[in-house]
Image (spheres, rainbow, N blue to C red):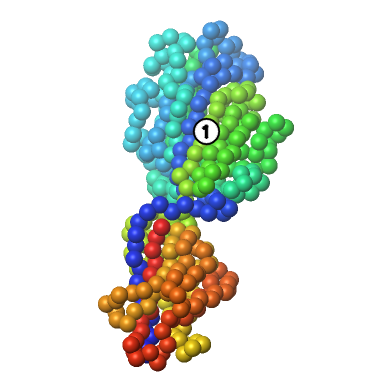
Amino acid sequence: MKLSSLATAFVLFGFASTCAAAPVAVHGGSLILNLDAAAFANGADPGLYSGYGVTMTPGQPHIVLGRYFSLEDMVGRRLVGNGLRPDLNGMRPVSNVGTATAPVWSVDIRQFRTTYNAAPTRTTGLLFNVYDTAPPPVDGFRSPVSTDFSIDSNGSPATATGVIGFGGGLCFLYSNDAFLSYPNSGRYIALGDFHLQHETPPGPGYTGWVFYSNVMGSTPVFLTKNVTVTVYGSNVAISGDLYSSGDLLSYTAMIDTLQIGTFSFSTTPVTHREAWRKAYFGTTANTGNAADDADPNGNGTSNLLDYALHANPSGENPGRTLAMQSAMGSGNKLQATFSCARSRPDLTLKLQASDSLTGPWIDLAQSVGGATFSIVTPGAAVSERLIGDTRQITVTDIYAATDPAHPTRFVRLSVITL
């Protein structure tokens, strides 16, 4: 009787859910900001104007929301400086602005304001997409903040680690004539390329969930209260009230501790296989060198099989190939021993046997969704033990080696995605 060790991967695409007890990782989703226009218009610190030697013009707002920038407009760009920028077409969104030769997005509020109490362009439903691996920056500019975040399934803030990076930006423009008439006027403030993280609460009454703006350094601009965290399956939802921080006061001269709106965030969950791709290839996408059927290190096994076996698929390390060990067990039956990853909830592994390479193949034992291997065909036997991050599996065939009806036997590991 002969033993042939074959590694084949049959890929059936479907939905894979993360085990409810495991930490939930984040790689996608959206943040929605609902800002209070009245707070931004009327929430000025009186000391700002007196510090400049002017008195606020009655009936005029302090600042209004000047422009919302999309993710594409924001990546790797910086928004700094002041002065009149009449070439940027007022409040309309602009693309291809903020290059190395013109690294400023700005507009004088007086270009588009028809009345002193003009309504802000957009304050509710401001959508920010979540970075997985952040896009590369424009040459010579700041790198966006990518997402590396996980939270325990019980929703406890104490177990939330990392940051959630959001693409997009906001531009706030001073609109009070008393301030605009000051020399070098046309001032504005830009916030964006946000990230959300959990830390020690910044003060009494606040939660530890803090929004940072990464446009001008990395600054905690929005503090939060009344935050609700919900973890359901492999999804996370976080929502609450936004409050201005001391840093936002220094940028916008708005009173700190002022409620300025609400936020809501919901995730697109990361599967185990996506997290594995990101660790080795820097992306969760099933494409290119990171694709399930790719073999970037040329060792003869696909990424999917490397994932199943807890092998390293990278080009720098050839990783582990499938090497079954054969032996004779009790009853003179063939045994096949191999190692696989300790936890792969998105896979079904089947150890199969056949008299011929062309089949038919029968299932001797299988593991569904990361569970322990169980016998499929009566007469087979299976045992396993944990060794670090791997499981060592031994499967015994149903036929004795001396059975004349089965003089040659082949075995293979079938890997099926759920």
Residue at 57% of width from left, 40% of height from top?
A: 230
Where does residue 31 sit, x and y in percent of width and height? Answer: 48, 36
Q: Is residue 238 at all visible to an observer of this figure?
A: yes
Q: In this rendering, is residue 83 above or below 197?
A: above
- For the image shown, how many numbered marks are present on the structure? 1
| Category of crowding for the residue at label 1, using alpha-carbon neighbours closer than 10 angstroms: few (below 14), some (14–19), many (at least 20) | some
Image-based side of 270 in relation to 205, left or right:
left
Image-based side of 271 in relation to 20, left or right:
left
Depth check: give the residue in front, 181 or 278. 278
Q: Quadrant of the N terminus?
A: bottom left
Q: In this rendering, is residue 372 above or below 56?
A: below
Residue furthest to the top in view is: 58
Query: Hey, what amino acid is under mark 1?
Result: Ser
Q: Quadrant of residue 210?
A: top right
Depth check: give the residue in front, 156 or 359. 359
Residue at 52% of width from left, 11% of height from top?
A: 60
Where does residue 52 sit, x and y in percent of width and height? Answer: 60, 18
Where does residue 339 sit, x and y in percent of width and height? Answer: 49, 75
Q: Quadrant of residue 88?
A: top left
Q: Quadrant of residue 262?
A: top right
Q: For the residue labelled by badge 1, is the local secondary structure a helix, a strand or a loop?
A: strand
Where does residue 335 sit, x and y in percent of width and height? Answer: 46, 83
Q: In this rendering, is residue 129 above or below 94?
A: below
Q: Is residue 319 at all visible to an observer of this figure?
A: no
Image-based side of 29 in relation to 200, left or right:
left
Depth check: give the residue in front, 148 or 182. 148
Which residue is tagged 1? 264
Residue at 57% of width from left, 74% of height from top?
A: 385
Q: In this rendering, is residue 40 above or below 16?
A: above
